[in-house]
Structure formats: C-alpha cells, structure tokens
Image (spheres, helix red, strand yellow):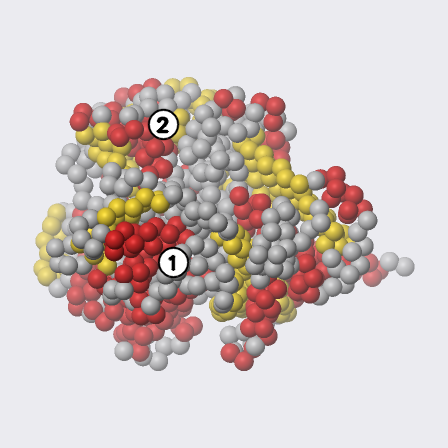
Amino acid sequence: MRLRFTLNGEPQELDASPTASLTEVLRSLGLTGTKEGCRIGVCGLCTVLVDDLPVSSCLFLAPCAEGRQVWTVEGLARRDPAVVAAFVEHEGMQCGICTPGQVVMASAARSELGAGAAEAEIREYLIGNLCRCTGYQSIVMALGSVVAG
Amino acid sequence: MTVEPALDARLAPRPDAAAKASGATLYAADLPAPEGLLEVVLVRSPHPRARVVRVSTAEAVAAPGVAAVVTAGDLPDALAGRRVRDMPLLARDVVRFSGEPVAAVLAGTRREAESAAALVEVDYDELPPVLGAERALEGRPGTVHDAPWEYPGAVAGEDAGPNVQSVVAEGDRAGVAEALGRAAHAVSAVYRTPSGQHGYLEPHAWVAVPLAGGRRLRLWGTTKSPYRLRDQIVACLGLDAGAVEIEPVPLGGDFGGKGDVVDASLCAALARHTGRPVRLLLRSAEDLAATDARHPSVIAVRLGCDGSGRFVGLEVDAVFDGGAYAAAKPIPSVNLHGALECALGYRFPVFSLRSRVAYTNTLPKGHMRAPGAPQVVFAVESAVDELAAAGGFEPADLRRRNLLHDGDADAYGHRWPEARGIQTLDAALAAAADAGDGSLAAVGTGVVGTGVAVYARPTPLPQSTSLQLGRLPDGRLEVAVPIPETGTGNHAVVQVQLASALGVAPDTVVVRQVSTGSLPRDPGVGGSRVTVGMSAAVARLAEAWREGGGQGTVSVEVPAGSGAPALAYCAQVARVAVDPETGELRVLAVVTAVDVADIVRPRSHQLQIDGGTVMGFGFASMEDLLEDEGQVWASNLGEFRIPSAADVPALRTVLVTGGRGVGEANVKSVGELANVPTAAAIANAVFDATGVRIRTLPVTAEHLWSALQERAAAAAGAGSLP
Ligand code: FES
Ligand code: FES
C-alpha cells in the first residue's frame, strides 16, 4: 500500500506491506540507527518519535504512520545535536546498540519530563530502554543533563 | 618502558561515541545487502531429543521467492566447535536440543524465507530426553551422543563415564575430609544456579559472500575473536588456510556470547552451496532460546575452620549442565575456568575441587563473563557466611582472618607477591558504613540487612597479537587493530595508549579494526586480557614507529608475554530490604571495592564496574531462562528479564589504588570482576535481614516468601514442643 508521512522533517512516500512494522520500513530506507532488538516492545532499541512521542517502532504498524511526523535518531542527531553531545560527554554507552533508542528518549524527555526531573523519575522514564553494558548510571546522567538544558 | 598516559588523553571522549549516539555506526545487521543476497531462516526442532525421520521440503521449495531449502544431506558432513567439534551445522538423523536447526530456508527476502520455513515439514520420532546434569552423569535415561570421546578435540575419554563433556579435578579430597573431621566448625551445603543468557541486545548476525566460485569466502558478523573464528571455520569445512577472511564489524555487546562458531560456519557452508551471498539474522527470541547460554550449576561445598576462625579445608564439587554440545566452550579443558578461581583469594591448608560438565538434551552452554565464577563464588562465599554463623564469627572478620597476605600461596600453591584482599574488603566496608551520602542509608519497608562477598581473579599475561601503524592522507595516525570494539572501550584504550606513547593528542589517532587478511594474528577478546595484551603491543608499536622515524607503515607482532600475572580483588557490600509479608527483595545499594594498579581510561574502567555489578545483581535476583523439560520457557526479553534502569540498586565504587599490575601499562583487569561476588553479597544480606539462607538463585519473591514461611513454620513447630 501507498504510505505518506514526514520523515525527519522531509515528506516521504513509499510502498509498504500493510503488515510491515515501522522498524522494517525505516531500516529498508537505510535508516539503520533504528535497531531491531526484542521485537516485542521491551528493549527500546527501535525507539523513534511519532508526532513527538516516543514509540517502539517494532510494535508500530507502518500504515499507522500515515500523515504523521516521524523522527529517527539520524534526524534527531541533526535537529538536536546537544543530545548526542550529552551522551558523548557522559559516555552514556559502551557497545552502543541501545544508544540510538536512549538518545531518542532523551530528546523526548525535554518536553515529557521537564528540567526538574528527579533521578528516580528519569530511571522510571527509561524503563523501556534496556542496556546490558553500562549499568545505566552514565545514561541517567546524560539524560539528566539533557532535561536540565 | 612504562607508558604513563597523560591525564588529558585518559579523559578524552570515546572515539566511537558520537557515531554510536547518532545512529551512524553500522553493526552486522546494518551493513548494506550485497548484490544477490539470500536471507536465511532456520527451521528448528521443537523436541529436546528425537530421531529425524523425514524432512519434507517440496512445498517450501515451491513457495514464492525461495531459492533453496537446505538440509544436512546437502552440506558437507562437518562438525563445528571452538575446541571440541561436536555440533553439526544442521541436525543429521537426530536432534539433541529443542531449538537445534534442522533445515535452512533461503529466499530473496526474510519474509519470504519465514513464510516458507513454516511449510517445511519434519517428522520426528521422539526419544526420552537426558535432563539434569547429575542424572546425565549417571547415564540416565541414555546418552546424548553415542561416542562423544571420538569428536575432534574431545577431552573426556570413554572411561570418564556417560555424558561427560569435561572433568577437572584438583587438590586432595581425602585430605580435606580428614581436615574437616578435625575442624572446630564445619559446614556442608549445596547451592544451585539457573541457566541464563549474556543478555547482549544485538542478536547474532552473519553475512557470508562466496568468491572465486566458493573457493574463498568473506564473512561479516558478530564475532569477538575473528582470527580464531577464521581458523575454526576452515577446520570445520576442510578449506584451505587462506580461504576465509573475516571482515571488521563492531559488536552490540558480547559478555562471552559472541564467540560462537556454528552459525558462522553454517553461513559459510550455505554461501558455498548456493554460490550466492547469504545473511542470517537471528531473531532476539531465537538468540535467547537457541544460542549458547550460561551453565546452570549444582555446587556442593564443604568448608571448616579452627576455633580461631582459620580455614582448615575447602572442598568444592561442581556439576555444570553443558547442554547438548560442547562446541561453544573455547578453552582447552572445555571446562569453566572460573570454577577454579573459587579458592584463589584465601589461604586453605588443604583444598579440593572437582568441576564436571555434563551433556544433556538442553540448549548448548558456553562461556559468559567470568565463566563458572559467578556460580562457584556464589556457593563458596555463601558457605563462608554459613561458617561464620556456625562458628559465631562476624562474616567480614572471618574473611579477614583468611584472605591472602602479600607473598602468600593460594590453594594451588602459587605465590602472589601482592594480595590486597583485606584492604579491598575494608575499603568496601568503610564506604558502606559511610551512610552520609544518602544512597546507602537503608530505608524502606521490611527488614534490612547487609552482606559481603569477595572474589579474586588473576590478570593474565598478554597473548600474542599484532598491530600496524600508518598515516592517513589528512595527517592523522591510523592504527590497525585485529580486535572488534565489543563495547568495553578497547579501541579507546588503544587510542589513549598510543597517543600517550607518542606524545600526541588522542584525536590525532584513529583506531580501525581490519580484516583477518590484514594482520597476522590475534587471540580475540576474552579472558579480561585485552587491555594487558594491547598495551604490550602498543608499546612495541610506538617504539618501532619512532625507530622508523615516524614514516611509512610499521607492523609489529608481539609474542605472548612472560613475567608474573597479578591478582586483583573485588569486594562487594550489598544492602537489602525484604518485605516479610510478600518476600519481595529490594537491593538498596551495592558498594564495590576494586583492587587496581594504573587505569588506562577511567571512564571505560568505571563502566565495566557499573555494568558488571548490575549483571551480578540480575544474576542474583531475576535472570533465569526457566529451562525445564528440555525447553527454554523464558524465551524473550519480556520473560527473560534483565535489569532496567529502575530496577538497579544505588551503586558506589571505591578504587583501592596503588597496586602492582601486569605489563607495560601496569594494569589489573576489571571486566570480569564486579559481576562475580554480587549474588553472594545479596544472599548474605538476605540472611542478615531475615535469618533465611537462600541457596538457590535467583532470589525471587516467590522463592523468598516460601523460605520465610518454612522458617516461620519450623519456629512455630519448635516452639510447640513440650
Ligand atoms: S525491538 Fe522494539 S522494543 Fe525491542
Ligand atoms: S551500551 Fe550496550 S546495551 Fe547499552
């Protein structure tokens, strides 16, 4: 089926299977910063923004993106380089496979959490973005610095 | 020569950080598809043990997009493995675990391959599975393999008994029995740990491209030891030495799980068979339920001390469930070297250890972060606490009386010039007592307790490796390394070391992994040896570069290091709260003290400690593949739970600085320390809080609640006696 949406600020039009996930469609466009992990909405590797809200794109059927604003990590890194800089500065990563999802969350956290967010709120906010490497401390710090502005 | 990294180099950002955070880094699954690519989907056995009667592929072959459906008969009769070659690429005649691949469907797209895989019909003749390592070692109800001693690389002979993958026995069993007979206090208990998985979030992925009509192959994929893998594939498929080249790819986490050889060899064989590039992308659930996992264990410990609390003897008898194949275990003993580390940190006048690994009809087990050590240290460090309770000693004090001093010999008779267990333990206790920082102020509902545990691990000597240095057109230096960036920051460590050695800014040094065709040798990532090994090689490289006047390209090949390994201690203090009504366990804080020498890159070092501690916490409190009846029941990341940001306790690290390390950089390794003592520290804290001794992991609320109920019932029963 024909699908039209805005992708990283640019109009996009393509053919997609009605059962394709948004992860599949984005990756087929070469936007491989959106990773495929658990495919059941648990790990957060596939997190993207749809109309400014973070979603697990593995559970988001591509046709549901019709007419919406989709931002992937690649677009957000250009639109909001301060988020990337925060993860670099606090070294909120090791292997980095979870990092794009964490960066997307951090970008959304600005409006969703607000500047005064407590550490416990940040941790709760990240509950759907697993990381096996870091123990989370440095990710929480990176996200904290993003929301603090 | 000693290389002293300049402080600013040590604090420079990771060279790969910005690319990772902006989604630009390409992992194996992200690489552009080669022309003519076929996607592979595997048809897996639902049965733990069965004869394969018939595989009907006709319908699948006719399905849209399908190029081939391959079964064992289409491929060379080859066995794959890292030491023991005991696993077929596709099951031939018999399946030995639920999840074992029986057929491979190759199609133009993954969807087409998946749909066609559902059309492959396999008739099985089910057999009673061999389950439970202890029963398996008795040969009940049969044998997983007919003649496992005949496999290339097998270490257990026919006389070892049924279903033996490996046996390691050390020490003097009779001597321990005699010493324990004379002990003032002694304990004897059995501890159990479940199977778990590494929990890396990037599933295994492989791309294999045939060249020269299939005589040569190039592979991209999830491997931490490309050079060894190359040799293993060549051995498996009987190819010429130069036939396989493994290309550079960063890993999305490893923890010991990205050393597998079977899937890579299968892809190589499929590429040769079809003459086309093939790609195997495991689904996360497949990866969890069908690639190598952590060995479950049953560990019997007997430990005694004299009236003043000096250990008189220790016996450890560990039985590990090795699953259906030993193929994933990389070391010559085909055992778990961590099991041998259970006794390194203390003085034991007499000691015995037996570590047996059994074949069963379950998921093949491999090596995971300090393989064997989390299991055995949970057992021994719990037993030390049980002995403290039995003898009326304070747990930390009992440890202090027995930890090695400088120059002491460990249980194997090896003398360690430096042994800083007491300082490390005291540093952890002091930090935990310092409740001033709030994170450790134990509050919350329920009863609160504190537990400690200690682990000692040798930092190995460098192994033989190779590096190359040249200059890029833009003037920066480029160092070619043989190892993938597994996540630990190993490329950043090379950058810091080389920049420091040459006195240049770190951002003028580019670190690039190259293919196995470009450098002569490397042992791969593992065994906590990378920083040590790379620092030896970088020092030689810098020397050679200077000698050559900083021109052209220089290569170095360094032999395995000589000299003395060093002992590194890690001590943890856990603070827990248990809700006596529900059994809910909350781990409030874990303080980790680490015995260190020089630190090449402080942030990488700290992340290894934080991530390790959280992995230890997961092992203690939640991780369990729930293997039962030969099936993995927790077969996705929703059911196989690993800690989230909200689960983890407050973490605090104390570094016990000033130690003497290994090699040019004077380092003690850190990657496999902090994940080891955590489970015992938590179980010991649960005992402190409740008086209930947990000997089976993970400590779930159900489990703890039942134990609390039993204890209450026993107390009530005892109280009602006349
Ligand atoms: S892949 Fe979408 S949440 Fe894990
Ligand atoms: S950095 Fe490896 S999973 Fe998060």
Q: Is residue B631 left or right of residue B403?
A: left
| Residue B338 numbered tag | none
Q: Residue B261 sits in which quadrant?
A: top left
Mark 2 residue crowding within 10 angstroms, few (<14) / some (14–19) / many (20+):
many
The residue lying toward the viewer, choosing from B61 and B313, is: B313
Where does the image place residue A27, in percent across and percent down from the top left? Answer: 20, 50
Q: Is residue A20 visible?
A: no
Upstream in sequence: badge 2 or badge 1: 1
Where does the image place residue B94, in percent across and percent down from the top left? Answer: 45, 23
The residue lying toward the viewer, choosing from B641 and B145, is: B145
The three-letter amino acid code for the residue at tag 2 is Cys
Q: At 44% from the left edge and 51% from the top edge, which residue is drawn? A: B528
| Residue B129 against residue B252 in the figure, above or below | above
Find disc 2 in the rendering and name its residue: B236
Q: Secondary structure at mark 1?
A: loop
Q: Secondary structure at mark 2?
A: helix
| Residue B216 against residue B624 in the figure, above or below | above
Q: At 61% from the left edge and 23% from the top edge, which residue is drawn? A: B159
Find disc 1 in the rendering and name its residue: B1
